[in-house]
Amino acid sequence: MPTRTVVIIGGGIAGLATAVRLIQSGIKPIVLEKRPLLGGRAYSFVDKDSGEEIDNGQHVFIGACDQFQQYIADIGASDQIRLEDRIGFPVLKNGKTSWLKARKLPGMLANLSALLGYKHVGTAGKLRILWGLLSIKLTRLGKNSPHDQITFDDWLRDHSQNDETIRNFWNLIILPSLNDDITGVSAFTGIELFKVALLGAANNPAMGIPLSGLSTLVGENAKKYIESHGGEIRTGIDVESLHIDKGEISGVRTSNDELIEGEAVVSAVPANAMTKLIPGGNDGQPDFFTAAESVRTAPIVAVHIWYDRPVLTEKFVATLDSPLQWVFNDTDLKSRTDSGQHVVISLSGAWEWQDQPKQELREIFIAEMEKTFPAAREAEITKFTIVKMLEATFRVEPGSHQRRLSQRTPLPGFYLAGDWTDTGWPSTMESAVRSGNLAARYIVEDIRTGDQSSL
Ligand SMILES: Cc1cc2nc3c(=O)[nH]c(=O)nc-3n(C[C@H](O)[C@H](O)[C@H](O)COP(=O)(O)OP(=O)(O)OC[C@H]3O[C@@H](n4cnc5c(N)ncnc54)[C@H](O)[C@@H]3O)c2cc1C
């Protein structure tokens, strides 16, 4: 039986992943989540209009997300995700479709071969892209790298890229991956993304898809694992602050003034929620945490349309020169067999759409669907809904790398997890799992060495 107890604030993927790792190290986690459901920013719910379980936003992962896939395996849910074997998706531009599709070649060559048949960039543009990728390969990134001070757009233009290659290739990947336009993200993160994905193994950029609703996939499966291995999960618990006694953490205090005790505490909440947990004046420690106050966020808007017949033949389609960005065929992805089709339009960096009323979005996006997919002109719309996530991801703007805090803090017994902490990954499920794995590793190391006095 576990002899030590660690309190984890937040039942999103980071908190749940921390709990799973602690259990594997013989430590009992108590996960406290303020909402009634687990999964944090990756959740699903039953839509009251359609009666269907829908995700709060289309979540995908790529082959390089190895720690996320391991987490899914650990909680016994590998059969609820599917990973393609290489990159391949159609891109629509002004009525013409062209695929970015890797050929069956070894390693990175497979990824580069995806450019060969891609017609939305001309031959000179492809040579530019290859030059850009080579420059990325040769770039070294470090902790205080100057690449965090400039935008990826500026860096690419300094490396022979032009409007054609940036709009039709680089930003096609950047916008959905980093939830921001290429002019808003740091060169550091952009370079890192292409190094890991396109310049890695053949399955690194391959698309992975959840096959079940997100609350089941990342929440319920984790709950079953954690509770059946001696851990505890309590929902509806709003943690107000850390409980610090004579400079040592001994638990947390909830908004109902309950003291929940543990030998260490992990904050697995977003950056702005974390800073509110620390009581002021902790021996000058807040200095370490101040950087987290300037972490900013970006919205995602999902437009759900139910048609009475199929309008999309592919599982997902990317678009250029259209507000549609990425369109997912949810019916096919979730292997439903109904005669109609549920389509999800995923709008990243959605500042333009976040304040628009549902009716206006309906008119705009139904017209765009009809313009882009001829079958939509004949189809009837049976249901329509919008999900707006105003703080969907943290922004990886220039300077943001410095704001990502280590999972080990100077406050003895207090650790951080959360996608925004220093994992090297952008705001993703992979980053959330990595942060949890690191937090758990530091706790275990500190127990072993006795470094943290409260342990
Ligand atoms: C619409 C959308 C689409 C996305 N698409 C993708 C994608 O395609 N691929 C991808 O990898 N990632 C995607 N993401 C990002 C991904 O969902 C997040 O990176 C990840 O879920 C973050 O997990 P987390 O545990 O770090 O934080 P969160 O999910 O924010 O979890 C924090 C938890 O802490 C709880 N909490 C906060 N304060 C307190 C408190 N005081 N007491 C108790 N509990 C508290 C919150 O309720 C929440 O459950 C998307 C996100 C959104 C919103």
Image: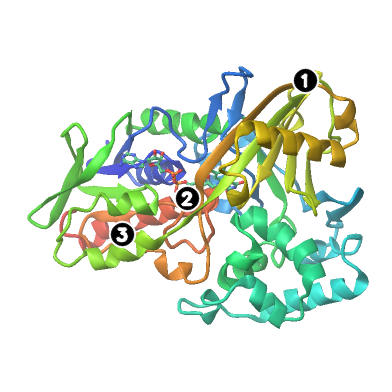
Disc 2 within 8 angstroms of ligand 1 (CB) = yes
Q: On the rendered image, what quadrant is the N terminus found in?
A: top left
Distance in Å between CA atoms under marks 3 and 1: 50 Å
Q: Tag 3's secondary structure?
A: helix
Q: Tag 1's secondary structure?
A: loop
Q: Going 67% across and 81% down the picture, which residue do you hit?
A: 138
Which residue was labeled with disc 1? 337
Near mark 1 (Cα within 10 A), the count class, few <14, some 14-19 or many ≥20, is few
Q: Going 80% across and 62% down the picture, which residue do you hit?
A: 168
Residue 71 shows up from this direction: yes
Distance in Å between CA atoms under marks 2 and 3: 20 Å
Distance in Å between CA atoms under marks 2 and 1: 33 Å
* Above or below: residue 131 compared with residue 391: below
User: Does residue 69 appear left or right of residue 174 in this picture?
Assistant: left
Q: Tag 2's secondary structure?
A: helix
Query: Residue 297, percent across and down?
Result: 48, 54
Disc marking residue 432: 2
Residue 4 shows up from this direction: no
Query: Residue 352, percent across and down?
Result: 62, 50
Disc marking residue 455: none
Q: Nearer the viewer, residue 354 or 241?
A: 354
Q: Nearer the viewer, residue 210 or 175?
A: 175
User: Does residue 364 appear left or right of residue 228 in this picture?
Assistant: right
